[in-house]
Amino acid sequence: FYTFLYLKEKEKLLFKNDSIYAAFLSKANLRFTNGESNILEKTTAETQRGAIAIQLNQLEQDIELFKLQFMLLLNTTTHFIPTEASVKIDFNLTNDSNLVYQHPFLKIIEQQKKMSVLNSKLEKSKLMPDLSISYYNMTMNGAGADNNYYNSSTRFQSVQVGLGIPLFFGSHRAKINASKINQYISENDYVIERNNLQLGYKSVIGQYQTNLETVNYFEKTALKNAKLIFETANKQFLNGELNYLEWVMLTNQAIGIQSNYLDAVKNLNETIIQINYLITK
């Protein structure tokens, strides 16, 4: 979702830059026709715009690919277009690392661990004697074996007690040992996965802090500098204080800052998504 928004922002930036170099190329052609500049200025303008056209073409292919992936994710044939007010995810970091213990995958492993404990107890119980008690209550109509006549009001009762003792201990003990090993493996898997989630959370928190600092730097300083560089370069170029090569270099620097900012936001979003995954938010 946010990768698509990132690509659309990249597309906006490239269209903006294409307009800048289109105007520059028009002026370069006019200056070249009037003999006010050499072929180098015209060629540079054409090269810059051609490079932007290539990037736009590749970007449009990436956007179409993400549209198809979005349709596959939603299991639909309808073309839904993600929209959001900001390309940057709104996020408040929580310092409660215990939230990772609520992760569904860890819950599954915990359930498997409990099942292995119950299975081990079940196998042990099979070595215990099997005690059975049966109670019978019945009636009969007619003459009995003692030549007495009985009707339905007469009740006959009996109790049967049985004791079953396992004879093949070897096979049962092998199953018990196997169940103990499975229990140990399940418990070990649970500890390993819990530690992996905890370490993964700490690692991604570090990446988040780094990416957040980078984005903050761009928003507080670099983007303002890029705007100043671009405006100043245009003004000085129009006043003849800069030649076209210097203007191209400064313009590309300002564009690069804006592009790097979008890349920084994309990296920040990815770490936020990873954090939300780990804390199942």
Image (tube, grey):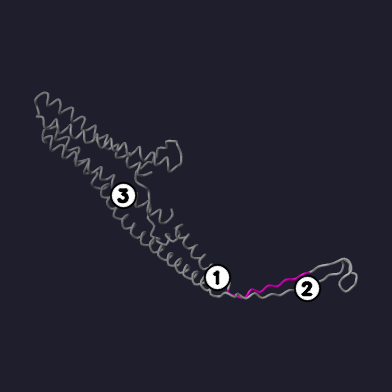
From the viewer's side, name the closer residue of 229 and 31.
31
State the image coordinates of residue 246 (x, y, percent, origin top left). Answer: 13, 38
Asked if the magenta segment contains residue 169, the reply would be: no
Q: Which residues are magenta?
A: 127-136
Task: Judge left or right: residue 141 versus residue 237.
Answer: right
Mark 1 — residue? 123
The amino acid on which the numbered mark 2 sits, given as a three-letter code, is: Ser
Circle nearer the N terminus (2, 1): 1
Q: Residues within 10 Å of mark 3 (few under 14, many from 20)?
A: many
Image quadrant of residue 96?
A: bottom left
Tell me what residue is drawn at x 51 percent, y 68 percent. Answer: 117
Name which of mark 3 and mark 2 comes first in the sequence: 2
The earlier-in-sequence mark between 1 and 3 is 1
Mark-to-mark CA distance, 2 and 1: 33 Å
Residue at numbered disc 2: 158
State the mark number for residue 217.
none
Identify which residue, 191 or 262, lies in the foreground: 191
Q: Amino acid at mark 3?
A: Asn
Quarter of the image for residue 240 reads top left
Label 3 to label 2, Cα distance in Å? 79 Å
In the displayed structure image, the side of residue 76 where residue 54 appears, left or right? left
Question: Callout 2: helix, strand or loop?
Answer: strand
Provide residue 99's location: percent of width, then percent of height. 43, 59
Q: Secondary structure at mark 1?
A: helix
For image coordinates 19% across by 42% down, the residue present is 253
Residue 137 pos. (x, y %):
79, 69
Query: Dot 1 surroundings within 10 Å: few (below 14), some, or many (20 or more)?
Result: some
Q: Which residue was labeled with disc 3?
A: 267
